[in-house]
Amino acid sequence: MNSQRHDQKPGVTIAIAQASTEMSGGAERLPVISAIASSLSQHRRKTSVMLILPELFLSGYVRTLHDPAQAASADNRYLSLICDIARTQQLWIVTGLARSRPNGIANSAVAIHPNGQVIAEYDKICLFGNAEKKAFVAGRRTIVFDSPLGRTGLAICFDVEQADLVKKMARAGAANLLVPTANMSPYNQVPVKTLPTRAVEAGVRIVYANYAGIDGDLTMLGQSTVIDSRGNILALLGDSPELAIVHLDQDQADRLGTMSQPADDPSLSQLLDD
């Protein structure tokens, strides 16, 4: 992976792993996560480090769509190993994965603390297209938690394109959104037009981690990005596997804890039920 770097004041280092689609299942992906995490040790001496991975990363996007139950079973085993990596390397890890729920399989994201514990878990609310709606049950709750960035929310891909949902997360206290994604052709406008608009509308920082390459019949576009609350693009990757390292000001929240609330605003009802 190549590296693109943008320096601001020291405090928090965000690392976006724009991953190749050519890897097979988690057995191949886990060593990649471990290697990236190890390579970030130089930053860990001066800052908190947060590694962000794409949507459904542990088993792969298309692979998970084809057999979500099998992916959820495998991802559950992989998750404990990723927690071990977070603890050993003393960094935060946010990744997409499939999770079993009482009513089906969810397209989820988790935030793992450097102590190795999952401290936040989110299920994608706005499922994209018929394939996702067939494979997954939609999430019903937003979540906001404390990270080195301050109050932080999780979203997944299509979620962050929805103005009402992003504003809801901001009203719940999120100043940052960490977004595993699988953005594909022809939606090139999302990272360079849609996301800066959403960031400004809601006053949030957006960290968006995508794949690069061919996945089944889909072309994943890359273009992973970090956008500040004024819509400025702090980092924007190309269409190849890369690692973006962005240093951000530390903005630690005073109040610790995790807050989850239903995504039941009237303005969101159509998004949830479509």
Image (cartoon, grey):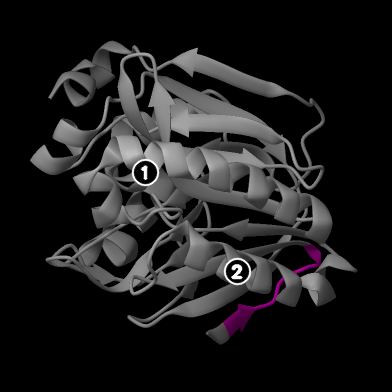
Q: At label 2, which amino acid type do we have?
A: Pro
Is residue 75 in view? yes
Q: Residue at x 42, y 67 (%)?
A: 224
The segment highlighted magenta reads 4-11
Q: Residue at x 82, y 56 (%)?
A: 88
Numbered disc total = 2
Left or right: where does residue 178 sit relative to residue 201? right
Secondary structure category for the residue under label 1: helix
Q: Residue at x 30, y 54 (%)?
A: 61
- Provide the residue designation for mark 2: 31
Work out which quarter of the rendered image holds the C terminus and state it: top left
Q: Residue furthest right?
A: 45
Q: Are marks 1 and 2 in contact (CB under 8 Å)?
A: no
Left or right: where does residue 238 sit relative to residue 252? left
> Relative to 140, does residue 224 appear above or below in the rendering?
below
Mark 2, Cα crowd under 10 Å, few <14 / some 14-19 / many 20+, is few
- Provide the residue designation for mark 1: 71
N-terminal of the two: label 1 or label 2? 2
Image quarter of residue 105 = top left
Mark 1, Cα crowd under 10 Å, few <14 / some 14-19 / many 20+, is many
